[in-house]
């Protein structure tokens, strides 16, 4: 084994564990040493769970030895958990004073499924308060920082998940995505972040932000790693009213299928006209389109409704549904929120039922428009963020850049979307990311295309200068 265990991808670590060349105990110990060395700078870990994880790693090692191999590629693999996702017996703080003593009585469905696959859980990870708001300095825990440059924002709200995986503290983590919150930190931290089709992954045991927009998704360093995680996480759950009765698949099966024969629609107007991207982001997207074409994809320009329409619909629905979740606390304990979170939650209290219904009506029309585009193409290519990560201590710049993105359309429509690194900004040396989108439940095709791009592009081996 040439690389230190913490530097291995999930799939590489799993292969070594299966070959009995790496033990889960050794892998976890090296990851914990990495956390000890870096987390005082990055603030990714909200709650360390090291003793329980060590016991689980020892049990995994004994089981693998007893059975002659692991029960799945995740057996003995450390996975971080965003701290709005329940882990039995541990607080789910939601990064908030309001939930410091809120102890989970059971594992969230995704945690239970990963645990059944043999994963171990060393840490609960930082988030924006209730997966909303933004990076705040008036909360019980400091905001996570970007491993590429700790003065910069790692993206949100799955900020600790992005920081921990990018810094090689952990090979993988779970995030949630209501307006882009898996794909945003994946973009800013140089990772792969997957938002599955709405309903494919259960949200039972995940603190809600907006019931009809929330997704749970994996974050890792490679497309294959995300495919392995999704295979363990996906599947129907009768206890989640939004769950789709769709069984999990082997999402790794087509990863070597390449791009030849795939029709890709390039949604240029999102970043060229609707919300103009920085020149570096625009150039990186055009270069990614060139790479896809060189690998055999048939590219054509595709027009969708303006980005602002998707953003407005997302904003109304998210605000109304979040206000419904938070109404008791907003009335009784408003001072216990961070100022930014409170400012973002309160407008939802003043929306009317008419506003919400009209947004849902327009949502149906936007879904139909994207479905119509998929009659002509197999995938969409578009921007993720329109800017590199800004400084975390510049609230005006955070406010300006946060909505400059093209992720929310696919929370509105529910289609699966993945962010993959596609460049590095020259001035800041921070990652840039693209987004690929597929028809509902076409994750295998989406991941096939993302893996094809990943192999052909030069970014996969890049890592933060830590």
Image (spheres, rainbow, N blue to C red):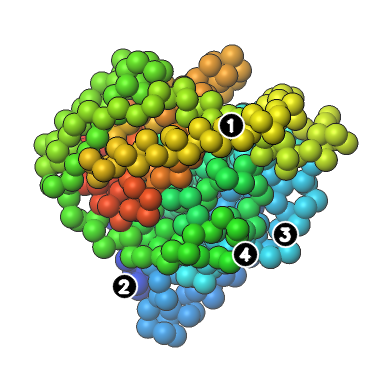
| Residue, disc 4 | 239
Q: Nearer the viewer, mark 2 or mark 1?
A: 1
Secondary structure beneath disc 1? Answer: helix
Q: Position of residue 203 (x, y in %)?
A: 58, 55
Q: Nearer the viewer, mark 3 or mark 4?
A: 4
How far apart are the two marked residues, 2 and 3, measured between alpha carbons?
36 Å
Mark seen at residue 104: 3
Which image quadrant: the N terminus?
A: bottom left
Mark seen at residue 133: none
Q: Residues within 10 Å of mark 3 (few under 14, many from 20)?
A: some
Secondary structure beneath disc 4? Answer: loop
131 w.r.t. 338: above or below: below
Q: Is residue 234 left or right of residue 100?
A: left
How far apart are the two marked residues, 3 and 4, measured between alpha carbons?
17 Å
Which image quadrant: the C terminus?
A: top left
Mark seen at residue 358: 1
Q: Position of residue 66 (x, y in %)?
A: 44, 85
Residue placed most toward the observer, 41 or 254: 254
Q: Earlier in the sequence, mark 1 or mark 4?
A: 4
385 w.r.t. 124: above or below: above
Q: Earlier in the sequence, mark 2 or mark 4?
A: 2
Secondary structure beneath disc 2? Answer: loop
Q: Is residue 346 visible?
A: no
The residue shown at (55%, 65%) is 237
Q: Residues within 10 Å of mark 1 (few under 14, many from 20)?
A: some
Evaluate if marks 2 and 1 touch, with contact meaning CB atoms under 8 Å apart.
no
Evaluate if marks 2 and 4 touch, with contact meaning CB atoms under 8 Å apart.
no
Secondary structure beneath disc 3? Answer: loop
Q: Earlier in the sequence, mark 3 or mark 4?
A: 3
């Amino acid at each position: 084994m040439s690389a230190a265990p913490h530097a291995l991808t999930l799939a590489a670590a799993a292969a070594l564990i299966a070959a009995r060349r790496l033990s889960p105990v050794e892998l976890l110990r090296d990851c914990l040493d990495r956390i000890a060395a870096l987390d005082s700078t990055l603030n990714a870990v909200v709650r360390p769970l090291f003793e329980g994880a060590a016991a689980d790693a020892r049990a995994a090692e004994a089981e693998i030895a007893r059975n002659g191999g692991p029960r799945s590629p995740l057996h003995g693999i450390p996975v971080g958990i965003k701290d709005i996702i329940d882990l039995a017996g541990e607080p789910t703080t939601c990064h908030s004073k309001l939930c410091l003593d809120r102890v989970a009585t059971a594992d969230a469905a995704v945690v239970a499924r990963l645990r059944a696959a043999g994963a171990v859980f060393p840490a609960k990870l930082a988030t924006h308060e209730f997966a909303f708001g933004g990076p705040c300095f008036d909360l019980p825990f400091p905001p996570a920082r970007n491993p590429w440059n700790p003065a910069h924002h790692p993206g949100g709200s799955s900020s600790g998940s992005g920081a921990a995986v990018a810094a090689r503290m952990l090979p993988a983590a779970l995030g949630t995505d209501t307006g882009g919150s898996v794909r945003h930190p994946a973009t800013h931290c140089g990772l792969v972040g997957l938002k599955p089709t709405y309903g494919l992954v259960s949200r039972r045991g995940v603190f809600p932000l907006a019931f009809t927009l929330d997704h749970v998704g994996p974050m890792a360093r490679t497309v294959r790693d995300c495919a392995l995680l999704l295979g363990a996480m996906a599947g129907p759950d009768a206890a989640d009213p939004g769950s789709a009765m769709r069984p999990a698949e082997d999402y790794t099966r087509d990863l070597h299928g390449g791009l030849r024969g795939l029709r890709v629609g390039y949604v240029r107007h999102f970043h060229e006209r609707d919300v103009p991207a920085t020149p570096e982001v625009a150039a990186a997207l055009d270069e990614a389109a060139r790479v896809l074409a060189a690998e055999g994809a048939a590219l054509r320009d595709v027009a969708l409704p303006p980005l602002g329409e998707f953003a407005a619909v997302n904003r109304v629905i998210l605000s109304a549904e979040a206000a419904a979740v938070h109404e008791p606390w907003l009335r009784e304990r408003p001072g216990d929120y961070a100022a930014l979170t409170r400012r973002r939650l309160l407008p939802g209290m003043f929306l009317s039922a008419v506003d919400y219904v009209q947004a849902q009506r327009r949502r149906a029309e936007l879904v139909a428009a994207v479905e119509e585009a998929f009659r002509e193409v197999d995938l969409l290519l578009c921007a993720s963020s329109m800017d590199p990560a800004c400084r975390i201590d510049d609230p005006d710049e955070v406010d300006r850049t946060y909505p400059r993105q093209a992720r929310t359309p696919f929370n509105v429509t529910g289609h699966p979307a993945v962010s993959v690194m596609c460049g590095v900004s020259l001035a800041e040396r921070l990652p840039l990311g693209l987004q690929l989108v597929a028809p509902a439940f076409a994750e295998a095709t989406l991941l096939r295309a993302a893996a094809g791009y990943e192999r052909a592009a030069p970014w996969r081996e890049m890592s933060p200068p830590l």
